[in-house]
Each structure stands twice: as structure tokens, then as C-alpha cells.
């Protein structure tokens, strides 16, 4: 708020006395600090223009309230990636804002404050989010394409690379879907096992990362034959 000081004159019927200073008077005409609604900490987006939601801020003098949104690639906000200082408060609850320019893939930090275009509030807390628009890269290791196995369980192996963690991988063998039952490790050999009846099948692997990007491997075929002695 602003600080004001008033002076009082003591007067009689003939003249004015010397002015006397009063104590300081603080008048709070700042806007209140807004609250961050979303995204929450450690959110992942698979698009370059995510939406931000800011909770209500008020101005006691009745002036129009605006929000200042800052996004940076570092916690100290020395490298600003996005700035908008006049996001107009429209409703008394939560206000949404879509970015007008795209952000590159990577990790970001965001904060806001409110303003009535005369005075600003303090900054909110700082939160982080990550943008990842790239699908996982999946390399099939085995079985090799057009392999033949005796019917029964077969180990399907693959390798995966991604800038973020993998949420899950799914093996598709001729329409039979099998989720991974162990932790998927990037850069290492991962295995999903399943069995199918005698026949020839197309198989592939689909993986989903933390930003809900779905990467799909190439297709391979596998033939399962009947065990000897069985008819």
C-alpha cells in the first residue's frame, strides 16, 4: 500500500498555529496476491501452448485487476520465455489464459502477480511444468521379422528412448494386447512375454510417456507352429 502523512493546523480567532505532523497513515490500495490453480507442479504437456488458470485477486479500491504471467526456463527467471502483463480479470473465481506464442519442448517455471496498472502485488509461488511433444522411439530387438517358433510363450524384446519417463508399454500380437508387468527401462532391453495359438501374426509395441505421447514401433510377423507329437 501507499503511505500518507497529514498536517494539522491549530488555530484561534486571530491566527494559525504551527502545523503539526500526524502519525503516518498507510492506505492499502494494492491488489491482493493471486493463487496459482493449474498446472500443478511437475505437470507434463504434449502441446506447445498449454492453458494456465489463476485464482481470484481483488483490488480494494475497485480498480480493474490484471494478471501478470511470467514463464522462464530457469527458477531465477533470468531467461523469460513468455510474458503477458495485462491478462484481464474477468470473473471472481478462476481465470484461464491460453499462450499466444508456442513454447519449445523442455522444462519451464511459471509465476504470476496481479496489478491494477498503478501498483503490483507480490509474486505467487513458483511452479514447474514440462513440454514434451515427441513420441517415444521404439526399436524391436527380437524375435526378428518372419521368425518361426513352436507354439507357447515367446519373449518379445525391445529398446526404447525418450526424453521423459515411460508410463507403460503394450505388446500387440495379432490383436492380443499385453501390458508390461515390470518397470520399463530406457536404453536397456525390455521384455514382454505372451503366448498365442498356432498361426502367423503381426506384432508391434506401443509405449506411452508421462506427457501421454504414444510411440509405435514398426510391425513384424511371427509364425507359431504346432509342437511335434500333437495333432
Image (cartoon, rainbow, N blue to C red):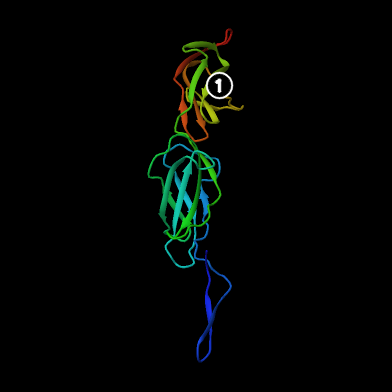
Q: Name the one closer to the observer, 113 or 57.
A: 113
The answer to whether 41 is drawn above or below residue 208 in the figure is below
Number of callouts in the render?
1
Q: Position of residue 26 (x, y in %)?
A: 55, 68
CA neighbours of label 1 inside 10 A, class few (<14), some (14 to 19), many (20+): few
Residue furthest to the right: 182
Q: Which residue is mark 1?
A: 187
The answer to whether 12 is drawn above or below residue 9 in the figure is below
Q: Position of residue 191 (x, y in %)?
A: 58, 20
The answer to whether 75 is drawn above or below residue 218 in the figure is below
Is 129 on the left or on the right of 49, as rendered?
Answer: right
Q: Position of residue 15 (x, y in %)?
A: 50, 87
Q: Name the one closer to the observer, 102 or 223.
A: 102
Q: Name the one closer to the observer, 95 or 150.
A: 95
Residue name at image x 43 percent, y 65 percent: 63
Residue furthest to the bottom: 13
Q: Quadrant of the C terminus?
A: top right
Residue name at image x 49 percent, y 38 percent: 73
The answer to whether 132 is drawn above or below residue 172 in the figure is below
Q: Name the one closer to the observer, 63 or 211.
A: 63
Q: Position of residue 122 (x, y in %)?
A: 53, 55
Q: Secondary structure at mark 1?
A: loop
Residue furthest to the left: 100
Residue name at image x 51 percent, y 57 percent: 121
Amino acid at each position: 500500500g501507499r503511505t500518507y502523512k497529514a498536517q494539522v493546523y491549530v488555530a484561534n480567532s486571530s491566527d494559525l498555529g504551527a502545523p503539526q505532523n500526524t502519525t503516518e497513515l498507510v492506505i492499502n490500495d494494492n491488489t491482493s496476491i493471486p493463487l496459482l490453480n493449474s498446472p500443478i507442479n511437475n505437470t507434463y504437456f504434449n502441446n506447445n501452448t498449454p492453458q494456465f488458470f489463476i485464482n481470484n485477486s481483488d483490488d480494494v479500491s475497485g480498480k480493474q485487476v490484471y494478471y501478470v504471467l511470467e514463464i522462464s526456463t530457469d527458477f531465477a527467471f533470468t531467461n523469460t520465455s513468455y510474458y503477458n502483463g495485462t491478462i484481464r480479470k474477468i470473473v471472481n473465481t478462476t481465470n484461464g489464459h491460453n499462450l499466444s506464442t508456442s513454447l519449445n519442448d523442455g522444462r519451464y517455471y511459471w509465476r504470476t502477480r496481479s496489478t491494477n496498472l498503478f501498483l503490483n502485488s507480490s509474486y505467487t509461488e513458483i511452479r514447474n511444468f514440462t513440454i514434451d511433444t515427441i513420441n517415444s522411439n521404439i526399436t524391436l530387438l527380437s524375435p526378428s521379422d518372419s521368425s518361426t517358433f513352436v507354439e507357447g510363450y515367446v519373449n518379445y524384446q525391445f529398446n526404447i528412448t525418450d526424453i521423459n519417463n515411460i508410463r507403460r508399454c503394450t505388446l500387440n500380437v495379432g490383436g492380443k494386447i499385453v501390458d508390461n508387468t515390470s518397470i520399463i527401462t530406457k536404453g536397456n532391453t525390455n521384455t514382454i512375454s505372451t503366448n498365442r495359438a498356432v498361426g502367423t501374426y503381426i506384432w508391434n509395441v506401443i509405449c506411452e510417456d508421462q506427457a501421454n505421447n504414444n510411440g509405435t514401433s514398426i510391425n513384424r510377423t511371427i509364425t507359431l507352429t504346432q509342437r511335434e507329437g500333437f495333432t
